[in-house]
Amino acid sequence: MSTRHILLGLLAAGPSHGYDLKRRHDARFPQARPLAYGQVYTTLQRLVRDGLAEVDGTDADGGPERTLYRTTAAGSGELAQWAAQIAPPAPFVANEIFAKVVVSLLSGGDPEAYLRAQRAAHMNRMRELTAVKTAPGADLTTVLSADYALDHLDADLRWMNTTAARLTTLTAEVDTA
């Protein structure tokens, strides 16, 4: 995920302070890793340097002075171009679950037990996400984020079920190799 473009997208709604951008990022992208304040301010400085954002003034609002940033026309153009680009599907997909099953097969472990335990963990997380998205007052971003995560967990579960069904064949292939 491009922090640069995410911040431009948040600025598109109107001028903001770095603190507010960080807070809105964390609220709008609840499944993403929270941004560090230093990352927000460093990215804002780069956006200003590159002409994609500019300082729109400062205010103290009863506290320390804060800088207000806004998107420039060039920033809006870059944001629109980035948002329209198709994200290429990953040519190879490998994750920790896949790696652990393969290593378990190669080392004489118990991939079936691992898959059972991993399926249980996935099902628990799916219940948590379903509760989050169906909670009263859940906003659209929370629902979309939960749906995205649920679909990925569902794909993992389908792969685990397919792999569990193939374990006898896979184990025999490893034994003969």
Image (cartoon, rainbow, N blue to C red):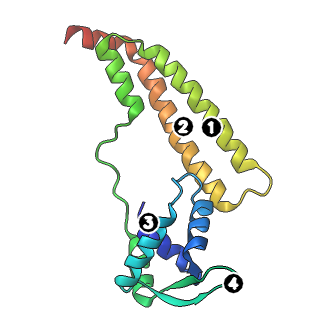
Front position among marks 1 and 4:
4
Left or right: residue 128 versus residue 177 is right
In this figure, which residue is indicated by the disc labeled 1? 126
Amino acid on which the number 1 mark rests in the picture: Met
Residue at image mark 3: 3
Provide residue 67's location: percent of width, then percent of height.
Answer: 54, 83
Mark 3: amino acid: Thr
Q: Residue at x 51, y 42 (%)?
A: 152
Which element is circle 3 on?
helix
Query: Considering depth in this image, is 27 or 60 the residue closer to the camera?
Result: 60
Tell us which disc is closer to us: 2 or 4.
4
Task: Look at mark 4 in the image and give the residue it sits on.
Answer: 61
**Real-space CA distance between mark 3 and mark 1, rounded to the nearest whole angstrom:** 27 Å
Around disc 4, counting alpha carbons within 10 Å, would you say few (fewer than 14), some (14 to 19), or many (20 or more)?
A: few
What residue is drawn where x is 50% and y is 61%? 36
Q: Percent position (x, y) of residue 62?
A: 71, 82
What is the three-letter code of the residue carrying label 2?
Answer: Asp
Q: Which mark is residue 154?
A: 2
Left or right, 14 with respect to 40, comes to right
How many other residues sit within 10 Å of disc 2, few (<14), some (14-19) or many (≥20)?
some
Question: Does the residue at mark 2 contact the one at mark 4 (Cβ under 8 Å)?
Answer: no
Q: CA distance from mark 2 to mark 4?
A: 47 Å
3 or 2: mark nearer the eye: 3
Question: Which comes before the other along the chain, label 2 or label 4?
Answer: 4
Mark 1 to mark 4: distance in Å?
42 Å
Q: Nearer the viewer, mark 4 or mark 3?
A: 4
Residue 153, percent across and down?
53, 38
Q: In the image as oriented, which residue stretches furthest toward the front?
A: 64
Q: Do callouts 4 and 3 mark residues in contact (Cβ within 8 Å)?
A: no
Sooner in the amino-acid sequence: mark 3 or mark 2: 3
